[in-house]
Image: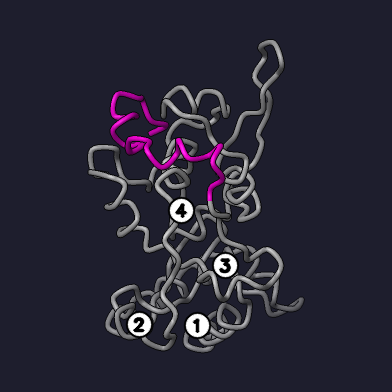
């Protein structure tokens, strides 16, 4: 199959899929007798990345494969399509997510030891409902507490191929910087009506200690990361 046609097919499949696809999955859309070599698929992907270099779209590789999306440089204009601003999540939730990402596998008790305050149930529930954090095992100590780690969906959402692509702790100056750099595009409170789209509940009095917690980056500066 000629490369221009193959590139067009790969582009069309990626646009229609609605989710990232790897080279093997792209190869699966071809019938018997028309399957190109896997290297040709990879060459088509590289050609598409070059094509998009000067356009408003980009082909990015994330943990689950390749995805065509609006270029991040276009965000200031694309964001004006909606009048609603993305919800900004609490410092406590971002700190908890950062600690899971950098220190996994980690238990809830270990997160609390580092932050110096209790972690509300609503925070862990929200992170798991987003499918960004999951239970990866249980610590072999009395009570066998659950150990948490990040998911492939977490990597996909933040355009990461793997944990090695996370910024170093030295690059994360404070929790406000984390919020700005990640540009969390969660639904606003008024839009959170569909199942699975609810944002973090307003903290109850028992969770109020989270509001006074120091940034996770400051608490974790001396922790060895996974990379």
Quadrant the C terminus occupies: top left
Q: Quadrant of residue 29?
A: bottom right
Residue assigned mark 2: 51
Residue 20: mark in rendering: 3
Q: Earlier in the sequence, mark 4 or mark 1?
A: 1
48 displayed left or right of 188: left
| In the depicted structure, whether residue 30 falls above or below residue 37 | below
Magenta residues?
203-227
Residue assigned mark 1: 7
Q: Please report contact status of discs 4 and 2: CB closer than 8 Å, yes or no.
A: no
Q: Nearer the viewer, mark 2 or mark 3?
A: 3
Residue 159 part of the magenta-drawn span? no
Q: CA distance from mark 2 to mark 3?
A: 19 Å
Q: CA distance from mark 4 to mark 1?
A: 22 Å
Q: Earlier in the sequence, mark 1 or mark 3?
A: 1
Q: Quadrant of residue 56?
A: bottom left
Residue 225 part of the magenta-drawn span? yes
Residue sticking out furthest to the front: 205
Residue assigned mark 4: 161
Q: How many neighbours does mark 3 have within 10 angstroms: few (below 14), some (14-19), or many (20 or more)? A: some
């Amino acid at each position: 199959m000629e490369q221009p046609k193959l590139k067009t097919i790969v582009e069309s499949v990626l646009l229609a899929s609605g989710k990232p696809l790897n080279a093997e999955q792209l190869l699966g859309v071809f019938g018997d007798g028309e399957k190109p070599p896997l290297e040709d698929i990879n060459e088509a992907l590289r050609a598409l990345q070059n094509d998009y270099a000067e356009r408003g779209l980009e082909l990015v590789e994330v943990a689950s494969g390749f995805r065509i999306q609006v270029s991040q440089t276009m965000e200031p204009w694309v964001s004006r399509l909606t009048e609603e601003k993305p919800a900004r999540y609490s410092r406590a939730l971002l700190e908890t997510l950062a600690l899971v990402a950098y220190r996994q596998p980690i238990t809830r008790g270990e997160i609390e030891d580092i932050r110096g305050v209790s972690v509300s149930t609503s925070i862990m529930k929200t992170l798991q409902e987003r499918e960004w954090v999951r239970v990866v095992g249980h610590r072999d100590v009395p009570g066998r507490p659950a150990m948490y780690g990040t998911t492939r969906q977490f990597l996909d959402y933040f355009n990461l191929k793997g944990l090695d692509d996370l910024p170093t702790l030295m690059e994360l100056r404070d929790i406000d910087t984390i919020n700005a750099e990640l540009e969390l595009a969660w639904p606003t409170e008024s839009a959170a009506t569909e199942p699975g789209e609810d944002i973090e509940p307003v903290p109850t009095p028992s969770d109020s200690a989270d509001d006074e917690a120091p940034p996770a980056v400051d608490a974790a500066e001396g922790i060895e990361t996974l990379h």
